[in-house]
Image (tube, grey):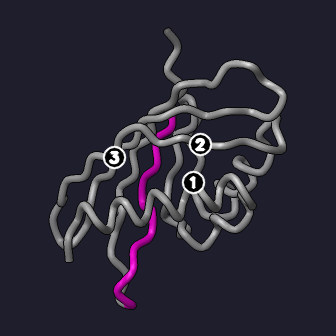
Amino acid sequence: MDPDAVAKAFVEHYYTTFDANRAALANLYQEGSMLTFEGQKIQGSQNIVAKLTSLPFQQCKHNITTVDCQPSGAGAMLVFVSGTLQLAGEQHALKFSQMFHLMPTPQGSFYVLNDIFRLNYA
């Protein structure tokens, strides 16, 4: 298993799903998962998806600039993403950074244990 290939595939799946149907991200999280969104900590799959679906915009498009990956023991991975977020009707894209701690599942896939998101203000 090539960690960089797994990270790239995960990132593509995550942001494509986020941009099309945020509620469908629920299966990537579990009850022990935690999201820190702009400093606000949210735990559990249902609560995380409730936060993501309540964001004050309907349509967006993520453009990924970089994906960095490191193995973190026991088959887990850290994935750090930077890019831009274009909101519908907005002229300027927002820069963001996001970190995922992916944990392996017995079925051979991964779930998000930790997710930290920040907008990058110039």
The residue at which mark 2 appears reads as 62
Q: Is residue 5 magenta?
A: no
In the rendered structure, find residue 15 and report the number of the disc placed on it: 1
Residue range corresponding to the magenta coloring: 107-117
Mark 1 and mark 2 in contact? Answer it, CB < 8 Å: yes
Residue type of the residue flagged with mark 2: His
Mark 3 and mark 2 in contact? Answer it, CB < 8 Å: no
In the rendered structure, find residue 67 and report the number of the disc placed on it: 3
Q: Mark 3 or 2 closer to N-term?
A: 2
Packing grade of label 3 (10 A; few <14, some 14-19, many >=20) is some
* Figure check: 27 above or below 60: below
Determine which quarter of the picture holds residue 45: bottom right
Q: How many marks?
A: 3
Depth check, front residue: 99 or 47: 99
At 20% across and 77% down in the image, what residue appears? 1
Q: CA distance from mark 1 to mark 3?
A: 12 Å
Indicate the position of residue 34 as horizontal and vertical percent values. Answer: 50, 53
Packing grade of label 1 (10 A; few <14, some 14-19, many >=20) is some
Q: Is residue 114 magenta?
A: yes
Q: Mark 1 or 2 closer to N-term?
A: 1
Indicate the position of residue 101 as horizontal and vertical percent values. Answer: 35, 56
Q: CA distance from mark 3 to mark 2?
A: 13 Å
Q: Main secondary structure of the magenta part?
A: strand
* Figure check: 85 above or below 106: above
Determine which quarter of the picture holds residue 27: bottom right
